């Protein structure tokens, strides 16, 4: 009779780790692209009235696309159990939190009028808090999960 290794029970991309991989590789990038498309469509009529909307959209779009690409890379790295996958995923989550914070200040930095900033500010703040919480939960999962520790046991991957 072979002894059961308790660590092997946790190895593999399953459960919450699989959900994270699906989120990073498919759902989060898809949400970013859909958000970008909806935002572009909604603000396009305002470009002439407030050219700063175009600047805001270009900055937000560039950062969102960059983060979506990094998200896909992090998700695939985790899914395929590649070296440094956890480090890549943590870096993505950290950068996404940083951009979430910076994006709260983008309307002012791009020159949107104060009345427009106030109009979109409440929704942006709520969205930022929810997004930051979502990213922080996944970051903590990567840090504390037994499955992550067992699957990516190589010290270079953590």
Image (cartoon, grey):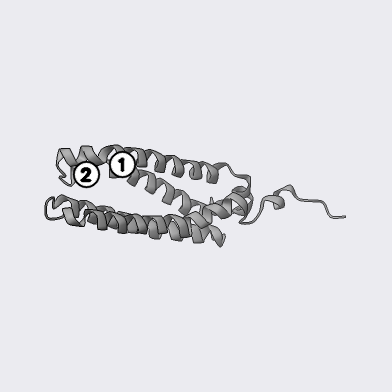
Q: Which residue is mark 2?
A: 107
* Residue at 47% in and 55% down: 24
Q: Quadrant of residue 12?
A: bottom right
Return the disc, 2 or 1, that comes first in the chain's sequence.
2
* Residue at 38% in and 44% down: 97
- Residue 120 left/right relative to 16: left
Q: Quadrant of the N terminus?
A: bottom right
Measured from the top left, where is residue 52 in percent x and y? 15, 50
Measured from the top left, where is residue 153 in percent x and y? 61, 52
Q: Quadrant of residue 38?
A: bottom left
Front-most of 96 and 154? Answer: 96
* Residue at 57% in and 41% down: 144
Q: Secondary structure at mark 1?
A: helix
Front-most of 128 and 47? Answer: 47
Q: Can I make out residue 66 in this image?
A: no
Residue farthest along the right direction in this orientation: 1
Q: Which mark is residue 124?
A: 1
- Residue 156 left/right relative to 37: right
Asked if disc 2 and disc 1 are in contact, CB closer than 8 Å, the reply is yes
- Neighbour class for label 2 at 10 Å: few (<14), some, many (≥20)? many
């Amino acid at each position: 009779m072979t002894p059961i290794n308790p660590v092997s029970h946790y190895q593999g991309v399953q459960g919450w780790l699989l959900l994270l991989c699906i989120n990073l590789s498919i759902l989060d990038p898809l949400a970013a692209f859909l958000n970008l498309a909806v935002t572009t469509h909604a603000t396009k009529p305002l470009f002439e009235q407030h050219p700063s909307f175009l600047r805001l959209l270009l900055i937000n779009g560039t950062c969102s696309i960059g983060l979506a690409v990094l998200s896909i890379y992090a998700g695939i790295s985790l899914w395929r159990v590649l070296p440094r996958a956890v480090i890549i995923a943590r870096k993505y989550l950290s950068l996404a939190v940083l951009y979430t914070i910076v994006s709260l200040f983008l309307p002012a930095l791009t020159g949107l009028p104060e009345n427009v900033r106030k109009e979109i500010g409440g929704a942006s703040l709520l969205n930022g808090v929810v997004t930051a919480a979502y990213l922080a939960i996944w970051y903590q999962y990567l840090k504390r999960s037994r499955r992550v520790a067992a699957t990516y046991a190589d010290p270079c991957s953590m």
